[in-house]
Image: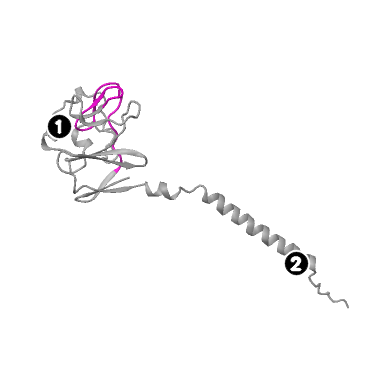
Amino acid sequence: MSTADAVEPTRRDFLYIATGAVAAVGGLATAVAFINTMNPDASTLALASTDVDLGPIAEGQSITIKWRGKPVFIRHRTPKEIEDGKAVPMADLIDQSARNPNIADAAAEATDQNRAAVGKEQWLVMIGTCTHLGCVPLGQSGDYNGWFCPCHGSHYDTAGRIRKGPAPENLHIPPFAFTNDTTVRIG
């Protein structure tokens, strides 16, 4: 009769197992570090959205905040500015599309109602870069008392619509929502 001899592990077997374990842990650590480099850093995540308190903004006043490295204009419009914006015929506009991600109809016309905050038409929130070459327009100026880009002469009205000059599009509307009566979240 033959019996199976039990093989004792040798020092060489231990070294093979230990070396394999160290290599596996090192490979896993390298993979985790590599995958982590694809995540956005903390400063990018912090700029993903921003809350703005609208309480201190008086009627007729504008503020400029920074969101994702871009200026954002927030204007508390007067009733006259709202009425002036509503009275503009669509045929007078260079860019007749709303481009507002906050309304359901993506192909909506650039009416004053489609450019202002839904249900809060006194508030206008727009990205503050000229659509011609990216300059920052001056507020409450120009031929239409809206925004004026002095670099190349683009005039925007009180709803941020291009009315005169080389800019091809209206000032863009960022995604935003009111979290309460006096706070807006942009982004």
Residue 40 magenta-highlighted: no
Residue 170 point in image, percent of width and height: 27, 29
Instruction: For mark 2, give the secondary structure.
Output: helix
Is 71 located above or below residue 162 in the figure?
A: below
Q: Quadrant of the N terminus?
A: bottom right
The residue depicted at 60 percent of the width and 53 percent of the height is 30
In the picture, the disc for residue 78 is none
Residue 49 point in image, percent of width and height: 34, 47
Which residues are the magenta region? 149-175
Residue 167 magenta-highlighted: yes
Q: What is the three-letter code of the residue carrying label 1?
A: Lys
Count residues near mark 1 (Cα–Cα under 10 Å), then give few for <14, some for 14-19, many for 20+.
some
Residue 121 point in image, percent of width and height: 17, 40
Q: Residue furthest bottom?
A: 1
72 horizontally vs 5: left or right: left
Q: Residue furthest right?
A: 1
Residue 184 point in image, percent of width and height: 25, 47
Count residues near mark 2 (Cα–Cα under 10 Å), then give few for <14, some for 14-19, many for 20+.
few
| Mark 2 → mark 1, Cα distance in angstroms | 82 Å
Q: Quadrant of residue 153?
A: top left
Residue 75 visible in the picture:
no
In the picture, the disc for residue 14 is 2
Question: Please, what is the dominant secondary structure of the magenta stretch?
Answer: loop
Instruction: Name the residue carrying label 1.
Output: 86
Residue 145 visible in the picture:
yes
Count all numbered tags in the image, as a single digit.
2
Q: What is the three-letter code of the residue carrying label 2?
A: Phe
Q: Quadrant of residue 28?
A: bottom right
Instruction: For mark 1, give the secondary structure.
Output: helix
